[in-house]
């Protein structure tokens, strides 16, 4: 009898471990669906607001001037630890002329670079483009280091879709976490029109 109970428990554990359902998130405004990273925490709206206020303070202290509309829509923030996070945000953006979004993107990169540089760390940056499920993204990578050691990397993916500035920020200090976020993002899907 003990053997049957032990065998049942073992089979039950295997069954439940092998059939865990992936958590997904869908943003209907931009037609985007992504599987969330298993084991990472979803931050509360209160914590996201706190992060935004801290970010605004950093902007102010850097001497940069940035217009924040207050219309930002935080889709979600996944966090692995204090530094490592995957954040998705959309901001309504109505172009007043053709390609306005593209014209503003270089200015935003310069501001982000200045904000980090004002904190007394070495900042290396690069820009590229990447296509995810037939959607072209501008990619801005920043590596922060001090005394020869990498403190953190941030990868920002941005695109203009359905009247929204869609922004993904991935902050990390581990190649394992970076790869987990990139695999997750690259596997995400957009509704076909």
Image (tube, grey):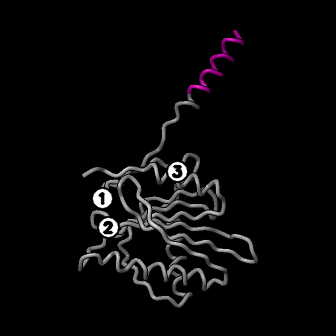
Q: Quadrant of the N terminus?
A: top right
Give the magenta range.
1-15
Q: Nearer the viewer, mark 1 or mark 3?
A: 3
Which residue is found at the position 36% from the left and 58% from the top?
A: 135
Q: Which residue is mark 3?
A: 183
Residue 12 lies within the magenta run? yes
Discs 3, 2 touching: Cβ within 8 Å: no
Which residue is found at the position 34% from the left and 52% from the top?
A: 190
As drawn, the residue found furthest toward the right would be 147
Q: Which residue is mark 1?
A: 29
| x, y percent for residue 122 | 66, 80
**Is 190 placed above or below 57 here?**
above
Alpha carbons under labels 3 and 2: distance apart? 24 Å
Q: Which residue is mark 2?
A: 164
Discs 1, 2 touching: Cβ within 8 Å: yes
Sequence order check, earlier mark of 3 and 2: 2
| x, y percent for residue 149 | 73, 71
């Amino acid at each position: 009898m003990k053997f049957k109970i032990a065998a049942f428990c073992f089979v039950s554990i295997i069954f439940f471990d092998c059939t865990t359902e992936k958590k997904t998130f869908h943003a209907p405004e931009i037609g985007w669906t992504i599987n969330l990273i298993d084991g990472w925490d979803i931050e509360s709206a209160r914590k996201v607001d706190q992060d935004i206020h801290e970010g605004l303070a950093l902007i102010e202290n850097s001497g940069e001037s940035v217009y924040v509309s207050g219309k930002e829509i935080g889709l979600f923030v996944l966090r692995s630890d204090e530094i490592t996070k995957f954040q998705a945000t959309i901001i309504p953006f109505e172009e007043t002329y053709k390609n306005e979004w593209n014209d503003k993107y270089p200015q935003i990169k310069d501001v982000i670079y200045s904000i980090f540089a004002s904190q007394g760390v070495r900042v290396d940056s690069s820009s590229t483009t990447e296509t995810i499920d037939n959607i072209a993204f501008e990619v801005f990578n920043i590596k922060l280091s001090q005394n020869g050691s990498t403190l953190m990397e941030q990868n920002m993916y941005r695109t203009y879709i359905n009247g929204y500035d869609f922004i993904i920020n991935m902050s990390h200090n581990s190649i394992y976490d970076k790869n987990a976020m990139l695999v997750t993002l690259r596997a995400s899907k957009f509704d076909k029109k």
